[in-house]
Amino acid sequence: MKKVPKYISLRIFISSALLYFFLVIPFAGFMWVQKMPELLRINSEAELTQTDSLLKVNLSQNEQAQQQSAKEFDTHDVLITNLFENNTAVQETEKKAKPPSRIGTSFDYLLDTFLVSLVILALFSIPFKRFFNRRRKKLFVTQKLENHCRKWLLKTPLIHTVLFAIPLIISLAYTAWALYFGKINNDLDFSMLQNYFYVSLLSAMLTILFVYYWTKHRVHLFYLEIIYNNMELRKRIFKKSVGKIRDRLWIASGMTTLLPLSIVIFYIVLSVTSFEDLNIPTVTDEIRSILYGSYAQLTENISLGNTIYINSLNTYMMLVGIGTSVFVSLVYIFAFVRWTTLDIVYPVKELLYNIHKTGEGEGDANFSLVRTNDEIGELSEGFNIMAQRIKDHIDSINQLSISYFRFVPKQFLEFLGKQKITDIKLGDQIQREMTVMFSDIRAFTELSENFTPKENFDFINHYLGYMEPVVMRNNGFIDKYIGDSIMALYSLSVNDAINAAIEMRAKLEEFNEDLAMNGKQAIDSGIGIHTGDLMLGIVGGRSRIEGTVISDHVNLASRLEGLTKLYGAPIIISQDTLIKIENPLQYNFRFLDIVKVKGRKSSVNIFEILDGEKAAQRKLKLETKEQFNKAIELYRNKFFEKAVSLFISLKQINPADKAIHLYIERCNKNIKHGIPEDWDGVEVLLFK
């Protein structure tokens, strides 16, 4: 996650205010120094005039006082009293003659209102600072605080700008009133105040825009994604009309060149003096040479009344003013170029990164944050719409692929060496040794007669929902469902198939508990497992194809599953499976028989996996295992009387063992009817 930035507002306000004063104060000082001689002259004339007036007033008052003192007071006391009163009158007259400086008053208004705006801005910024501080420290943020920040964040550039602009507007309004409606003593004061007004106006425009774009830059690039989530920022959250990059570049150019250049030009114009202001009656060749240099001779017939010049002091002041403006220009160029570059380059880089990631197909869809309201924001929003459509399309394809894999297992494609289901073709095939497992619900036909068609489907899906995860957990995959039967394939190890069969028997007990809770009858199942070479491939026609497994070994696994009913064994495996078990001693098993199933010429030894039995039955079969094997050996050696006697004793121990009942029946049949001369103990089974 992106690091949470600090929320800055006072820094922007104070920095911009200092920039404003840096522009205005040097100009005011320069203007005061430039006009100092004329100011001194005007002040001297005013003082002389005031002195003459005061002397006349003083003489008149002294004469009156002397006449009155002859009657009432001593002359000496009267003179002292008149002197004190005259000094007081002089001071009051001076105050009336010298009204307060308009420029100073304008500055006072500016400073006072700046302080008020600064306090208001600090109060306005408290919730934002608290929000960002808590987010930075990963502390809890109340919903009320978050809603407040979400409501006002996009308005902060305008609010900050208004708070900064109000003091400047008040100061400029006062200066304009003083120029055109206030009482100004002379033309010099008017000229100075007018120049101050213009430079203040230019400086105010520069700094107001500076505050707005600095705050806007911070909001768009640093604050948006902290307050708004990525889902909200996939489209423009700005309510105003679409902006233009062109307008931003025009404003940046004007801020960095035109306005600073205007101040430079203003300094140059202010430094220029007309020659006729010097009141020189005679124009000498030396004067012409100083004014025109090598062109002096060409100007002998030209009047110098309209000639302008710049004296040395004005030159120094002009250089200082131009230097100040150049410095401000550099500040503006650095700031605006940086802001404009980041505001354009950062979203574009972010957009390009997401385009590359989307093109590479890495992870989920990559969306860009819409940070601006211009063409880049419009482009980002358009990309997000496209990315969402691509994501929806990919999700749809993935869902389709998942659905395909539910019909054609992914492992099946891997065996055929195909990456996608669209790569398979009719006739694709491969031969591989695998273990086939068939599982079937016993007597499901009779059970289903009591169900409606919907109940049949619901019952089977409920049962398969228990069994399918077991197959997948044990590194197998389901090749097909045949009604209530499951055909699964295991390619890695025979142990996987046997482990899955044992676990399926355990799951069957859970399923039966579920049935009992719903008032339904418990079921039983049988599982047959065989290992051999299989042909996996694609069969079908032009309009319909499917993956399938073709092999005599598949049929044998199906026949072994059918034998579980005959022998009463939950899990029966072939000897081909038994000999490929990595560690046969980890399982409990017993030999059952040698059979020749329908459709197969060769016989097969079959074994029962006792771990699939219920605990009580498994214990009895394990206890009678040695005697059971001995009885089978007697049976195969044609000692039927001894075999049947042993089987009968085993029956008394475990009457639920169907294999014992089967062998007793066979022994009695052979004793009664005899056996063929070529009888070898192989049981031929003609049913499926």
Image: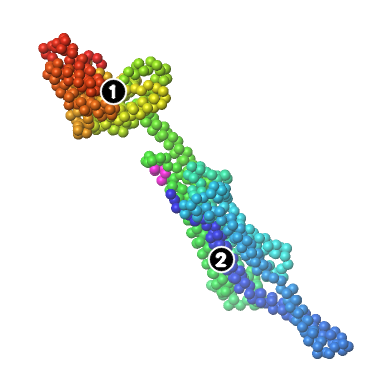
Q: Locate residue 266 relative to residue 1 in the image: left or right.
A: right
Q: Quadrant of the C terminus?
A: top left
**Which residue is drawn at the image coordinates 31% and 33% (left, top)?**
473
Q: Is residue 594 above or below residue 125?
A: above
Image coords of residue 562 (percent x, y)? 26, 19
Three-letter amino acid code of the residue under disc 2? Phe
Q: Is residue 39 above or below residue 656?
A: below
Splitting the image into 4 quarters, where does residue 126 fall?
bottom right
- Please check the rendered image and state whether residue 66 is part of the magenta-colored stretch, yes or no: no
Give neighbour class at mark 1: few <14, some 14-19, many 20+ (Cα, 10 Å).
many
Nearer the observer, 122 or 23: 122
Q: Is residue 594 above or below residue 198?
A: above
Numbered range of the magenta stretch = 353-357
Image coords of residue 103 (percent x, y)? 65, 67
Give the alpha-carbon distance from disc 1 to disc 2, as whole Å: 95 Å
* Residue under label 2: 22
Q: Is residue 44 above or below residue 273?
A: below
**Element carrying mark 1:** strand
Nearer the observer, 105 or 603: 603
* Residue under label 1: 526
Callout in the foreground (1, 2): 1
Earlier-in-chain disc, 1 versus 2: 2
Q: Locate residue 112 relative to residue 667 in the image: left or right.
A: right
Q: Locate residue 643 relative to residue 271 in the image: left or right.
A: left
Splitting the image into 4 quarters, where does residue 260 fall?
bottom right
**Which residue is drawn at the image coordinates 18% and 29% (left, top)?**
579
Three-letter amino acid code of the residue under disc 1? Gly
